[in-house]
Image (cartoon, rainbow, N blue to C red):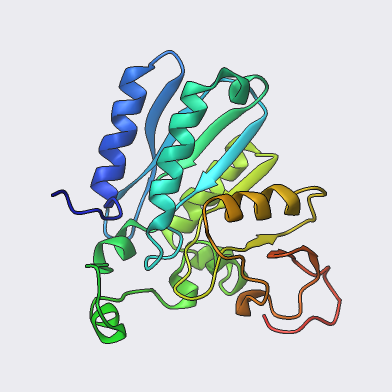
């Protein structure tokens, strides 16, 4: 019987390469940078419209679930022409391939098993967090690759895929999206996934619906973080 597991970065790249080869007129795979250890960062692009969506997986090394989600979204974008009608889709397969190579998730039976194989870099070394704590001349190459992609694409929507060890599913927004809460809650219910209404990463933030947390405006008196 096949053992289910989160795809490794090489497996993600292989799957993305197969998708691009299947529909070369619509999809392409390219390297957009390299990690501190020299591992390539890959971007899968689908469609040719200037209006872009950027999806990022693997920003946190201990949250590998985003890779599977990314591949599923890419397959849908290739299958459904309606998703490409006015939008191109771009998928950064893994923002931190070095970290991903150091974290393992071997179906742990206890918390001790899980933490034996746990790895996550310190905040200043994480691709999405480093701009908030480091000056531009000290940003790691993974961050520079990500920001270069953002500068190139100027996406109207960027989605960073994460995972959670405890609780249920929830969303963090930099700006409220009216109407998002209803389909989010409906989807979670259909898939029997609990909705987390008290996420510690968004404690004290405004909410626009169950599990939908909106980043406070600058200068407001918000709780952690």
Q: Residue at x 63, y 33 (%)?
A: 52
Q: Position of residue 214 (x, y in %)?
A: 76, 64
Q: Is residue 56 left or right of residue 181?
A: left
Q: Is residue 223 left or right of residue 139?
A: right
Q: Position of residue 182 (x, y in %)?
A: 74, 51
Viewer-side residue, 219 vs 158: 158
Viewer-side residue, 151 vs 122: 122
Q: Is residue 18 left or right of residue 95?
A: left
Q: Is residue 65 above or below residue 194?
A: above
Residue sitting at the far left: 1
Which quarter of the rendered picture does the C terminus lie within?
Answer: bottom right
Residue sitting at the far right: 220
Q: Is residue 185 left or right of residue 15?
A: right
Q: Is residue 34 above or below residue 17?
A: below
Tell me where residue 96 sits by quadrant: bottom left
Q: Residue at x 32, y 74 (%)?
A: 119
Q: How many marks?
A: 0
Q: Residue at x 39, y 49 (%)?
A: 67
Q: Position of residue 51 (x, y in %)?
A: 67, 29
Q: Position of residue 59 (x, y in %)?
A: 46, 60
Viewer-side residue, 46 vs 192: 192
């Amino acid at each position: 019987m096949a053992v289910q597991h989160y795809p490794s970065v090489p497996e993600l790249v292989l799957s993305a390469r197969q998708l691009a080869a299947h529909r070369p007129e619509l999809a392409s795979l390219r390297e957009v940078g390299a990690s501190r250890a020299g591992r390539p960062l890959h971007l899968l692009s689908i469609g040719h419209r200037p209006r872009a969506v950027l999806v990022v997986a693997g920003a946190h090394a201990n949250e590998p679930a985003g890779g599977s989600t990314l591949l599923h979204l890419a397959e849908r974008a290739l299958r459904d022409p309606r998703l490409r009608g006015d939008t191109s889709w771009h998928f950064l397969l893994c923002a931190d391939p070095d970290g991903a190579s150091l974290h393992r998730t071997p179906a742990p039976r206890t918390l001790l098993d899980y933490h034996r194989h746990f790895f996550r870099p310190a905040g200043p070394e994480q691709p999405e967090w480093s701009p908030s704590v480091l000056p531009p001349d000290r940003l790691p190459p993974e961050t520079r690759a990500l920001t270069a992609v953002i500068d190139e694409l100027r996406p109207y929507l960027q989605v960073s895929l994460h995972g959670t060890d405890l609780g249920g599913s929830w969303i963090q927004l930099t700006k409220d999206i009216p109407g998002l809460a209803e389909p989010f809650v409906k989807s979670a219910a259909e898939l029997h996934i609990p909705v987390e209404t008290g996420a510690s990463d968004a404690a004290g933030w405004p909410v626009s619906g169950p599990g939908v947390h909106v980043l406070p405006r600058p200068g407001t008196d918000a709780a952690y973080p």
